[in-house]
Amino acid sequence: MGLPLLPLLLLLLLQGPQIGAQEGILHASRDGPPPSSKDYCITYNSSWTSLPTTLSNATYYRLENLSSLWLCSSSDVPSTGVKDKALAVLDGNCSILDKASIAQKNGAKLLLIVSKNGLVLPANNRSAHKDLTIPIAFVRYGDMISMSQSLGNSITVTLYSPALPPFDYSMLVIFLISVFTVALGGYWSGLSELKDIKRRRAWPSFRKMQREDLRPSPSGGEREGRRKKDDNVTFTPVIVVLFVVICCVMLLLLYFFYMWLVYVIISVFCLASAMSLFNCLSALIQNLSCGRCRVSCCNKSAEVRLLFLAGFCIAVSVIWAVYRNEDRWVWILQDILGIAFCLNFIKTLRMPNFKACVILLGLLLLYDVFFVFITPFFTKNGESIMVEVAAGPSGSGEKSGESLVEVPAESHATQEKLPVVIRVPRLEYSALTLCGMPFSLLGFGDIIVPGLLVAYCRRFDVRTSSSSIYYISCTIAYAVGMVLTFVVLTLMKMGQPALLYLVPCTLITSSVIAWKRKEMKSFWNGGGYEIMEHVDNAANEENNIITHDEPQEAQ
């Protein structure tokens, strides 16, 4: 896995905050005999509209169902008027803010946008509509039909949004997953480093062993005991800068061509996660005694247990791909594949020195801040590019101000989302189950990017016999950064880019430890990594010499 595959790392770079929209409940009731009521799911922009948290504090309005009209001009308003009523109009043909402006001028108190494309996220630039105060919410076209059939034509409606619990246990689960993955990935990287050191210390005998192991075996194939190629990839400062540039380009491509590229990302995730799960599980079963027998085919041989393991990993990835939009249980598979994906990358991608770590984390922090906080000043709808990509095309339906494509009935296909997050359902938030299962999210990048620094600290501990002081300190700093992220998330009631807190915590802690131990120079330059790279190059050169000389020796 080398430089040509770096664009695949876009999978780990969506650390943007969650969209500003929230889900709420439309409560519809009928007074006439017999009295009846039903609840329906809605979406609304919490920065535009503040809804009561309980039904007892909500205000009811008589519903004027104009779901066959767009309300793009005052001529669509019925002659009977809509004063002090809740107005339901069809989505499309003009901006939802233009609809809201017409409804408010005619005295309506509530605007329901009836969507045939499922529930979308209200997003637009309100700078030209600062006088709007009318609440705006999206409701499904199928729900409006069900409402008319169940409750008739004389309906009163109201909106409310149950408050989130003071503590969400899903945050604790995400905290444990992220810290566990970072700590285990760093430790695994350290074990790989320790094996490399032992191999290099045995260098004199290793050269002789190489010459013997690279000779052809009597059966005509190469010996099974030959030295395996190192799968680690070193991130030099030049590759780091190129990596960030590629990520910026790929994010912009996703912003403009999401409908097509989302399936490319899903395919890449299936392949990469299956390979990562295989690498993680194969490392665990190496010490097992069962299944060591081998099967041969086309001059290749493999252990039976590894073949079964490969089939299992492929099956898990395929099952996730088939049922990826099933919220009830498939999030477990996505999290398992995501953890394996992050572990494999933390172990495989090696940072050569602290300088490369600072460049990588610093550039990605700027990347995060720019695409989350700066890009809203350049987009037409005032939303950040990161949020638009995370939300998908449904979140950017008003981006160009053009008409939405009309369909004869509501589409039941779930909106495709990028599989680049750890998802945990909000266990204590059951009031909105009719809207589907709400999730707390953490991007892969918020695990892998700081995890690369933790892995470097572990490798440096191994090289310098530092009793894991750098590794433990950086892991604790990552945990503190996650706690700080959750605290700010709870106080501000909106999603946060976690790298904004993780990068300073981990970089500052690592720097302080190196300064206190008076090892900043070797920590900054990578300690013995330059010597190790020189030894590796010498080994590769001798391998080439041995390989070229082998036919002559055979003669």
Image: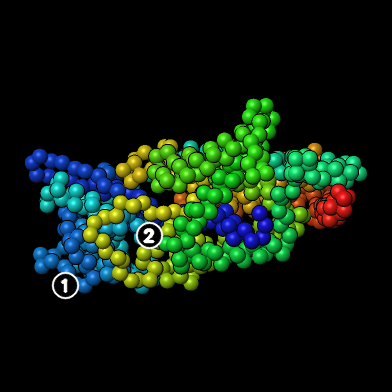
Nearer to us in this view, 107 or 191 = 191
**What mark, if any, has residue 75 been given in the picture?**
1
The mark found on residue 44 in the picture is none
Residue 269 vs residue 141: left or right?
Answer: right
Q: For numbered disc 2, what is the local secondary structure? A: helix
Foreground disc of the pair 2, 1: 2
Amino acid carrying mark 2 in the image: Ser
Question: Callout 1, which amino acid?
Answer: Ser
Residue found 48% across the figure and 70% down from its top? 377
Q: Quadrant of residue 183?
A: top right
- Taking the image as shown, residue 153 lies to the left or right of residue 352, namely left
Q: Rate crowding at label 1 as few (under 14), some (14 to 19) or many (20 or more) other CA atoms within 10 Å.
A: few
Instruction: Please give the name of the residue rendered at 12% of the width and 49% of the height, measured from the top-left corner.
Output: 152
Q: Position of residue 364 (x, y in %)?
A: 62, 60
Query: Are the residues flagged by discs 2 and 1 in contact, CB closer than 8 Å?
Result: no
Q: Position of residue 155 (x, y in %)?
A: 15, 50
Q: Of 262 and 203, which appears nearest the observer?
A: 203
User: Relative to 87, is 232 on the left or the right?
Assistant: right
- Reading the image, the residue beneath label 2 is 394
Mark 1, secondary structure of its residue: helix
